[in-house]
Image (spheres, grey):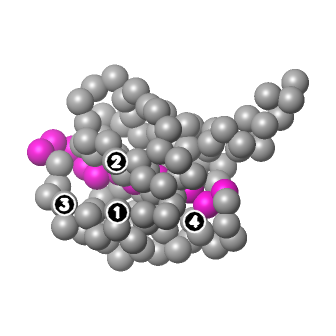
Amino acid sequence: MVTLAWWHLGSFQGDIARATRAAAARDDLGSLWVMNASHPGWVNLRREVLLRADPRERLAVTLAELAAAAPPPQGRDYAICDGRLREGERQRCVDAMKRLGFIEVSRHGRALLLAR
């Protein structure tokens, strides 16, 4: 019961997991950037897709890499902004992603899926 409560509260990054599953289900997924996670974790997208998952301490570095990255050979760039650990963290990430041309696709608790 305690584990279920922790999952529901996001202690195991359930919001990021749900957003990642939503991205993996999209036919036009070309790359996935997971931003602001407390730790990168593990994911299986069941296909070859560029995946970058960086902890929040590297957000500025990851944003610079994303700005300089070439578009994926097929599909679109997707990104997940998570803000469960610090107030305003997700919004700062979303604002930075919008400056890079991303738009909101879907919300998954405190995680937001964006695409460009």
- Please determine whether, in this image, residue 65 is positioned above or below residue 26: below
Residue furthest to the front in view is 57
Residue at (12, 45) in percent of width and height: 73
The reply to whether the C-beta atoms of the residues labelled 1 and 2 are less than 8 Å apart is: yes
**Mark 1 and mark 2: span between their CA atoms?**
9 Å
Measured as percent of width and height from the top left, residue 112 is found at 53, 55
Measured as percent of width and height from the top left, residue 95 is found at 47, 75
- Please determine whether, in this image, residue 102 is positioned above or below residue 42: below
**Mark 2 and mark 4: span between their CA atoms?**
17 Å
In this rendering, would 50 be left or right of 81? left
Q: Earlier in the sequence, mark 3 or mark 2?
A: 2
Q: Which residue is mark 4?
A: 90
- Please determine whether, in this image, residue 82 is positioned above or below residue 74: below
**Mark 3 and mark 2: span between their CA atoms?**
12 Å
Q: Earlier in the sequence, mark 4 or mark 3?
A: 3
State the extent of the magenta-drawn residues as a range.
73-84
Residue at (62, 42) in percent of width and height: 13
Q: Amino acid at mark 3?
A: Ala
Q: Earlier in the sequence, mark 1 or mark 2?
A: 2
- Which structural element holds mark 3? loop
The label number, if any, that marks residue 69 in the structure image? 3
Q: Amino acid at mark 2?
A: Arg
Q: Does the segment drawn in magenta span residue 72?
A: no
Q: Amino acid at mark 4?
A: Arg
Q: Which residue is mark 2?
A: 52
Q: Amino acid at mark 1?
A: Thr
User: Is residue 3 among the parts visible in the rendering?
Assistant: yes
**Mark 3 and mark 1: span between their CA atoms?**
10 Å
Q: Which residue is mark 1?
A: 62
Q: Earlier in the sequence, mark 2 or mark 4?
A: 2
